[in-house]
Image (cartoon, rainbow, N blue to C red):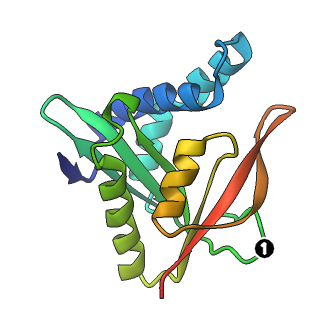
Amino acid sequence: MTLRSPQLSDASSIAAISIEVWLGTYLKRGVTAFFADYALQEFTTRKTEALISDPDQFILVSQNDEGIDGFIRVTSNAQPPVEGCSTTEIATLYVQPRHHGKGIGKRLLHTALRHCRDQGKDAVWLTTNAENAPAIAFYRAQGFEHVGETYFRVQDQGYLNNVYSYRFT
């Protein structure tokens, strides 16, 4: 496994992983047109290229012998969802489910946290689906503290998300 900065040519792979992981996280009983349309409009090559080019985004990809199997994206100047959070958000940490348990997520997260600390950040925050027990356990084991709740919104529907914070000491 190699961690590296993404190239624009990685955008379609990152978008595909985003669709795969997002659908698997939020849709447990089937895919409706409502969610399919959202995922296909949100996770596009063009939008991913814009994120890769955005100086407020820090992105790392994990690559194995065959391709990208995960990535993390940290956003500076993010709007915190609850009081007391910093403006630095771990916006995305996605690893393909078939690669879970191999240490990919932990390496991506620890490398991103080191980057944030080196940039002088005092804390980072993230949200995760309140029903995603494996992700919650993972973040708690890495030292994140539950600091609140928010809702992930898709049009007029809201889905409970937990907010976690990690403070650098």
Where is 68 relative to 2, above or below?
above
Q: Quadrant of residue 113?
A: bottom left
- Pinpoint residue 35: horizontal percent, then vertical percent: 68, 20
Q: Quadrant of residue 165?
A: bottom right
In front: 53, or 107? 107
Name which residue lies at 59% across and 31% down: 42
The image shows residue 83 at horizontal and vertical percentages of: 78, 73
Tell me the quarter of the image containing the N terminus.
Answer: top left
Residue 164: x and y, percent? 63, 63
Q: Residue furthest right?
A: 156
Q: Is residue 129 above or below residue 127?
A: above
What residue do we see at 72% from left, 48% from top? 161
Asked whether residue 44 is in view, the answer is no
- The residue identified by callout 1 is 83
User: How many numbered circles are shown?
Assistant: 1
Secondary structure of residue under mark 1: loop
Say which residue appears at 48% left-offset and 88% top-offset: 169
Residue at the outermost bottom position: 169
The 10 Å Cα crowd at callout 1, few under 14, some 14 to 19, many 20 or more, is few
112 sits to left or right of 93:
left
Would residue 120 be found to the left or right of residue 137 on screen?
Answer: left
Q: Is residue 95 above or below residue 167?
A: above
Q: Looking at the picture, which amino acid does disc 1 mark?
A: Glu
